[in-house]
Image (cartoon, rainbow, N blue to C red):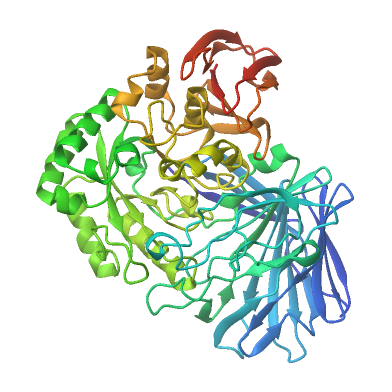
Amino acid sequence: MVNTNVVTALSCAAAILAAVPAAAQTVLRSPDQHIAVTVRTDDGKLRYTVARDGKPVLLASDLGLQLAGADLASDLSLVSASTPRVIEDHYQMAVGKRKDITYRANEQTYSLQNARQQKMDIVFRVSNDGVAFRYIVAEPSLPLKKLVQERTTFALPEGAKAWLQPMSVAQTGWSNTNPSYEEHYKMEIPAGTKSPTEAGWVFPALFRTGANWLAISEADMDGTWQASRLAQDATGGKYSIGNPMAAEVYTNGGLMAEVEGMLTSPWRIIALGALATITNSTLGTDLAKPAVDFDASRIKPGRASWSWAILKDDSIVYGVQKKFIDYAADMKWEYTLIDVNWDRNIGYDKIKELADYGAKKNVGLILWYNSSGPWNKTEYTPKGQLLTHEQRVKEFKRLSDIGIKGLKIDFFAGDGQSMIAYYNDILRDAAAAGLLVNFHGSTLPRGWQRTWPNLMTMEAIKGFEFTTFEQKDQDAMPSHAAMLPFTRNLFDPMDFTPVVFGDIPNIKRASTNGFELATSVLYLSGIQHFADTPEGMATAPDYVKKFMQDVPRSWDDSRLVDGYPGKYAVIARRSGNTWYIAGINGGDKEKTLTLDLSFVGNKQGVVITDGSEARSFSQRAIAAGKKVVVTVKPHGGFVIQL
């Protein structure tokens, strides 16, 4: 159940707007006083800096918006600043790092005007784990507010390093399906390095400057604003907000924000601190809108069998899907995903038979859909059945009536405002029908899983399926996988579709079985679609099968134990009274780790890791204590259950 309770307390009786000089400076600090944001106007420009413990994290960076008919980025004066107030928000998440979350921040609103007396507000929030800000324009002289360009920048100090994923160019790739956030990361490059594509860099963008790490992203995407990225050129380490490309729209829809009335931007998020601080942060959902009403009994995270990962299109037939329902039942998993062309190869009537068969075994069905109109060249079906509200209501009722639990919807066009609105419209109509949702070929969730409790997961990553197409993607996978807890999976659920113990046709696997097992815990996804077949799972010993049968569906708490982006990652997650610690080695050399597990207490348990033979496992008893030593093979991994 998702239950939101928001409490806002003022640091004084009221948030009084105080007049300030035209050239002025204000400082807003985090509750623990470690982070300081300075906002100032100078020569008509509005800029901010961020420091932690007195050390610069962001140098003077620009703020402002360019609207049609209003330049709110230059000739600005700071008219007033509100008295800082305390924001406190308590909420629950069914999908994410932890179930019960409390967000605390200090907030201040800055009111500005340009030389034409046109006004804009900027709201800043500073929490112990980062900074967030957003723009609000209610200027009455502009009934229609049309965004031309956001002028926000992020200026990194000299010597900063970056871990970034290039944004793919719209209308490229297989059947013109890009962009889908499916590129390999550029790791530990100098901040300011130009993106290899004109489309820029995706969020979350990860940086390091001195002892501080930063993760830049955005949240609260309600469909009125386009999704953003960092622009291609960042000369001198100064990154700016980039826009979607012209083709990234719903057919004949808008590209950039354009509203009548009040214009409100998404939150710009800068998680910062030690690597553990940003990895443990929940800012991506803290800044998202509270949950819409949704039947709590239908919010069911789980595990799923999925034939297409290994067996591809030919497996989407009645007999194979019945076999995968049996497989899910044997593994005590909650779902089976039936992928492309099920409408042609199986049909609605036989799908109902499978849904009824699955229900008897406590296995629900998820069905694949093609989102697209004419914005790409895909031919997989069902296609074009979800384009309008009326279509969705009709189709979703039909699915609910035959007992379908959710949808996997694929092949979106990108990040334009109209496409972001399309995502929200689908989620709204699916929620009304009580259906769970998984988006593929998609954008980044940006906190939607809080607002829409029926959103279980999204792809937006170069996941397992790519490692089945070409050996080069398989070979790059271990290091790529070790990036994801620090970037793509940092705030949002990710449908990587992990875990294969068996063979991949025509591909030599780069990872060990211990690595594969670890990803079942390491990666967060509301529904974890496991890629292995019944035959592959049968090669694992009984204790591994039992682990896969019992691996939790959701988590009460999570924390980084150790790691370094692109090299290795060790994360602990708790379900009830049991801790699961999962680690992977993305490198090609053996790595010995000394793990501080004192937070677990004096618990006993087991560690499962790679055995001495290829694709074998080993298991031994373990006591948590303060330090636990684990040796991890090249491209290997482990799980500890305490």
Q: Using the rendered view, name the quadrant where residue 500 is placed.
A: top left
Can residue 296 be seen here? The reply is yes
Q: Is residue 84 above or below residue 549?
A: below
Position in image of residue 81 (x %, y %): 78, 70
Residue 165 versus residue 80 in the image, above or below:
above
Q: Is residue 553 left or right of residue 166?
A: left
Instruction: Tell me: residue 614, above or below residue 299.
Output: above
The residue nearer to you, when weighing 167 against 69, is 167
319 sits to left or right of 577: left
Q: Which is nearer the eye, 352 or 143?
A: 352
Q: Quadrant of the N terminus?
A: top left
Q: Is residue 401 left or right of residue 503?
A: left
Question: Measured along the vertical axis of the image, is residue 482 above or below residue 179?
Answer: above
Location of the C terminus (image quadrant):
top right
- Residue 65, position as x, y percentages in the image: 67, 77
- Residue 371 pos. (x, y %): 33, 62
Residue 496 visible in image: no
Residue at figure coordinates x 44%, y 61% from the top left: 173
Q: Nearer the viewer, residue 339 or 154?
A: 339
Q: Residue furthest top?
A: 621
